[in-house]
Image: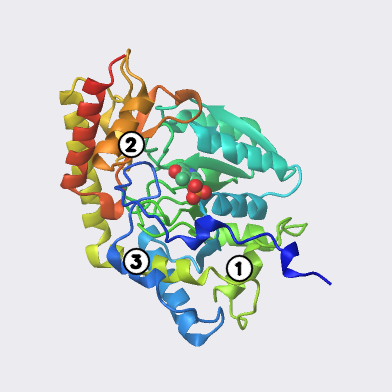
Amino acid sequence: MSTSSDLSPPPPSLLRPLDFPHKVLMGPGPSNCPPRVLAACALPMLGHLHPEFIKIMDEVKEGLKYAFQTDNTWTFVISGTGHAAMEAACSNLLEQDEVALVCQNGIWGERFADMVERNGSVAQKLIRPMGEVFNLKEIEEGLQKHKPKILFITHGESSGATAQPLEGIGELCHKNNCLLLVDSVAALGGVPMYMDKFGIDVLYSGSQKVLSSPPGASPISFSNRAREAVLNRKSRCRSYYFDANELANYWGCDDKPRRYHHTAPITSVYALREGLARLAELGLEESWKNNKVCAEQLWEGVEKMGLELLVPQKELRNPCVTAIKVPDGVNWKDVSDYAMKNYRVEISGGLGMMAGKIWRVGIMGYNATPDNIRLVLRGLKEGVENCKK
Ligand SMILES: *Cc1c(COP(=O)(O)O)cnc(C)c1O
């Protein structure tokens, strides 16, 4: 029999109150949540199939259809962060040895290709450096050469800070019997999106970026064409957790009674409901405009300081994530630390090939305000002045 002397003691750190810093999160996500979203996080639990929770799920679906501008019945939420939605798209759309053509102009294409290979499928790549986007001609050539089942492309690149023009890509894909998969985790809500009009077959996003909600509930939608492809698979989806047939049922997207598949992250769904309600009240056009106005304020301020942006063409910049080149003789981290220490504002560094070479500033949803941009500019300007090597 064990006695109390066998027990290791409770950790002293947990016996002290939670020590919590308030910060302005102007990196590429997560972003700050508005009070109504935080209030939703404090609501009591409901059961995952209680009628009141199902009503909230249905409201989330309506909000997503609005945000995506789609009528797709298979529009629901993946329990997990943006990567979970990526995995869900990959594992549902691709079977063993099937080919994906992956447009890679930053880490997201790179990661998606990795997921494709782990799924036992084949990743062919179109590669461009970070800071550049793809044109219709090279996409068409790629489709003809590789005959892929799906094409993956990133709408708002958060590592290379580009906004990929999407017009025409869906048409090219469909002409070549290919499904179009788009990652809009770092753009949805901040950049115009018309899922149905653009002919996108699968679109996913995340909750903690422009939707200004906590991480953990990721929107996804499948066109009828994509749904047919999933329904007509020869093998079952390798992931039980991400199986879209099961998830569509749990989210009430088929005509069968809802079954327990897994427990939705209840609190994250409440919060996403409030993030989407904020977007609905504001209106998509107003949200896109806020983002654009703040991004232009940032770009102007940065250039006035004599700093250079990674993406020279204004129309190809992602208004939700800006990349600023770190000048010679300055350590990016010192400046970022300066801004955090003095202004409690987050300015991030680069990823992958761009690590150490750029700063990244996120302008997302609730955080897209002129005051926040001024704070970033002040932190950056003083940081650079104070941190010259
Ligand atoms: C943040 C991000 C993701 C991944 O989201 P997580 O929530 O961190 O898993 C995917 N794609 C893009 C473009 C992103 O910016």
Q: Nearer the viewer, residue 250 or 31?
A: 31
- Label at residue 37: 3
Q: Earlier in the sequence, mark 3 or mark 2?
A: 3
Residue 348 quadrant: top left
User: Residue 106: where, in percent of width, then height?
Assistant: 48, 32
Q: In the figure, is residue 151 to the left or right of 324?
A: right
Q: Are marks 1 and 2 in contact (CB under 8 Å)?
A: no
Residue that mark 1 sits on: 247
Task: Describe the element under mark 2 as helix, strand or loop.
Answer: loop
Residue that mark 2 sits on: 347
* Amino acid at dot 3: Val
Task: Describe the element under mark 1 as helix, strand or loop.
Answer: helix
Q: Are marks 3 and 2 in contact (CB under 8 Å)?
A: no
Query: Which residue extends farthest front?
Result: 5
Residue at 57%, 53% in the rendered image: 84
Q: Is residue 254 above or below residue 16?
A: below
User: Residue 183: where, in percent of width, then height?
Assistant: 48, 46
User: Residue 210: where, in percent of width, then height?
Assistant: 35, 52
* Amino acid at dot 2: Ile
Q: Nearer the viewer, residue 114 or 7?
A: 7
Question: Considering the image in quadrants, where does the C terminus appear?
Answer: top left
Question: Considering the image in quadrants, where does the N terminus appear?
Answer: bottom right
Q: Nearer the viewer, residue 238 or 139?
A: 238
Q: Earlier in the sequence, mark 1 or mark 2?
A: 1
Label 2 packing within 10 angstroms: few (<14), some (14-19), many (20+): many
